[in-house]
Amino acid sequence: MTLVKYLVKKFIPLLIGSVFFFAFVLVLVDLFMNLWNFISNAVPAGTVFKIMALYVPKTLWYAAPLGILFAVSYTLSDFYANNELIAIFASGVPLIKFTAPLLVISVFLTFGLFYFEDKVVVPTYAKKVELQDFALNQEKTLNNDKIVVMSEKGNVVYKADFFDNAALRLYTVYIIIRNDDKTLNCVVRADSALWVDDHWKLSGATKYTLNGDTLETSEVDEETLDRLTEIPETFRNNTISVETVNTKEARAYIQHLKKAGLPYGEPLSVYYKKYSFPFILFIVVFLSIGLSGKTRKNVMLISLASCISAAVVYYVFQMVTMLMAKFGVLTPFLGAWLPVALFVAISVVLLKHART
């Protein structure tokens, strides 16, 4: 128990300090990247400060893997440099047993990071983007034009010239309804469509059906109207980024894409990434244990260099696998989880050859 307290007492301050240091660097990078835009748009200092404050949770989320990697690597390397581990190994305590408390801490931090991202990072980052766009006069309108939307797995297709988000109204609407075998059922043309409660209410509507070679017109029947239930959010000019919403909203968005028959590989891989990314905290502890003790000199410099190098390699590899998932080379699941599996294997190999 004394060894555990000693290890944790040295590790925790390093973890907190390194996470906040890396987060501070990320905040400065974002500030300097947008500084000229803030100045040219005469954004008040108070607004800039609020934007940066809202960005802090996102930077903490990004900095957590780097911070824990550095903290573990530096702590163990310092033990090696001061010959403290020699006494521990001589007493019969293996490296994996001595570092087990760090693995336990990383497990709790892994689940904590997931919930922190889902409950805190997502809403604060959305507010940051919204406030920054408003300050820089980059607000996007939700109105949309030249719209084509598929519903019911392509059995109902909406085409409209314009969507007014404030009024929740579509203008010059054509609705193509197909049978389950994708043969044409009918075409509905309306001057406009207003969203009322849970369906679209058509104005100036006519239903066209083919009876043999004859085109017949009629009023739109209730059975057809009951199928016009695609929500207004679908018609807005707002392609959702799965990375900027929580898991519940992301899951609903992907289900909508599947229902509409639209490509969903890329958002699905990003959705899986929400679950796989926090596991990097558990992985980097293994990685840090394997990387530690490689030198007795310049412990801080070597630890910092090793953790940054490992993080860069991981993020680059993850970026490649996510791109492969986007273009269908890998499945969305593999795109998100393959980097995790690979680095687990690398960490195990490093741990096996670590000094003990």
Image (spheres, rainbow, N blue to C red):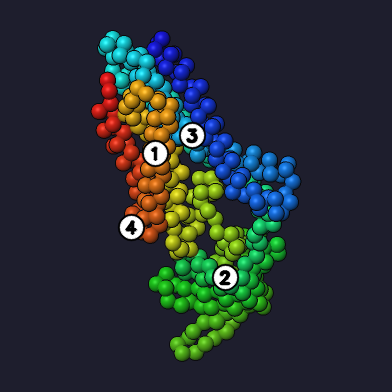
Mark 1, residue position: 309
Q: Position of residue 306 (x, y in %)?
A: 38, 34
Residue that sits furthest to the front in the current view: 297
Q: CA distance from mark 4 to mark 3?
A: 30 Å
Q: In the rendered image, which quarter is residue 146 located in? A: bottom right
Q: Secondary structure at mark 4?
A: loop
Q: Secondary structure at mark 3?
A: helix
Q: Position of residue 95 (x, y in %)?
A: 31, 20
Q: Are marks 2 and 1 in contact (CB under 8 Å)?
A: no
Q: Is residue 101 visible?
A: no
Q: Nearer the viewer, mark 4 or mark 3?
A: 3
Please name the residue shown 34% across and 14% down the image. Answer: 83
Q: Earlier in the sequence, mark 1 or mark 3?
A: 3
Mark 3, residue position: 64
Q: Which mark is residue 198?
A: none
Crowd around label 3: few <14 · some 14–19 · many ≥20 (10 Å): many
Q: Which mark is residue 329?
A: 4
Q: CA distance from mark 2 to mark 1?
A: 46 Å
Q: Position of residue 169 (x, y in %)?
A: 67, 67
Q: Earlier in the sequence, mark 2 or mark 1?
A: 2
